[in-house]
Amino acid sequence: MIAVLAAATRAQGVILARSPGMLATLAVIPLYSLVFFHFLQRHHREELATTVALTAFVMSLWAHAVFVASDVVDDDRSDGTLELSLLTPDRYLVALAVRTFTTTLLALPVLAEVVLIGRGVFGLDVTLHRPAVALPVAVLLVAGCASAALLVSGLMIKVRGARTLQNSLTYPFYLLGGLILPVSHLPAPFDTVAKGFFLSWATDLLRDAAAGPVPQLAQRLAVLCALILLQTLLGVLLLRGVLGSVRNGRMVLHD
């Protein structure tokens, strides 16, 4: 198993070196913070600078995970390795999970990037008052987005033309994650759906950690971990089912 994990990590490193475009969202999405910070200054709402920085970070992380899931499957399909991987679907599932997580992990520096943009370019007070809480929550965000990418990978393998759907997997989830509006402002039943979505819990925790003491920290972390674990299990089950269906001939791989 360790050999599989190491090989998958090395393989993804080679793919990233060959196709740096997989990291394009990490360069593009944080630039939105330039617009957001400029808007705050023009309207004299500098007190929202930290919230804006964290929103840009979470948006980048989610968008990156979605595009990584699409690119990983597309690369395997174009290289002809996807069909060969069906001979050992469990090993491919493990390798896909490792490759997705390691690539999604590269989005963590975006947090420092948006903080530096806010402080260095605009002179705003972007501060994380509880970094000992914020950083572990950011890592959990990476894990959650990577597990969501597993679900997207299963969709990419299963559905014809799913690549065209990847943009639709970003903005609606920004709403469900509480990035555009507070979850309490969403109409029913979307508010209920958002409360069961890991992204909304992680975003709230991250914002509270930036502001100061975090109420009910242990309980909220437990819920967040449970939601991420559940999503990971769903992703594994979906991928295993899809790969098993293709291997048994019940489903045909689409170009």
Image (spheres, rainbow, N blue to C red):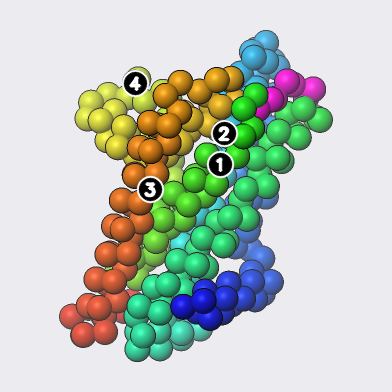
* Mark 2 crowdedness (10 Å alpha carbons): few <14, some 14-19, many ≥20: many
Viewer can see residue 218: yes
Q: Are marks 2 and 3 in contact (CB under 8 Å)?
A: no
Q: Are marks 4 and 3 in contact (CB under 8 Å)?
A: no
For marks 1 and 3, give the CA distance.
Answer: 14 Å
- Vertical order, 78 against 46 (above or below): below
Disc 1 marks a residue whose amino acid type is Pro
Taking the spot 22% from the left edge, 30% from the top edge, the residue there is: 189
Which residue is identified by label 2? 133
Residue 184 tag number: 4
- Which numbered mark, 4 or 1, is in the foreground of this view? 1
Q: Residue furthest top?
A: 44
The image shows residue 47 at horizontal and vertical percentages of: 64, 14
Which residue is identified by label 3? 228
Screen quadrant of the C terminus: bottom left
Which residue is identified by label 1? 136
Disc 4 marks a residue whose amino acid type is Ser
The image shows residue 198 at horizontal and vertical percentages of: 38, 40
Task: Please state the extent of the stretch shown in magenta in the rendering.
Answer: 122-128
Q: Closer to the N terminus: mark 4 or mark 1?
A: 1
Q: Closer to the N terminus: mark 4 or mark 3?
A: 4
- Residue 127 vs residue 1, the one in the foreground: 1
Q: Are marks 4 and 1 in contact (CB under 8 Å)?
A: no
For marks 1 and 2, give the CA distance.
Answer: 6 Å
* Mark 1 crowdedness (10 Å alpha carbons): few <14, some 14-19, many ≥20: few
- Vertical order, 250 against 56 (above or below): below
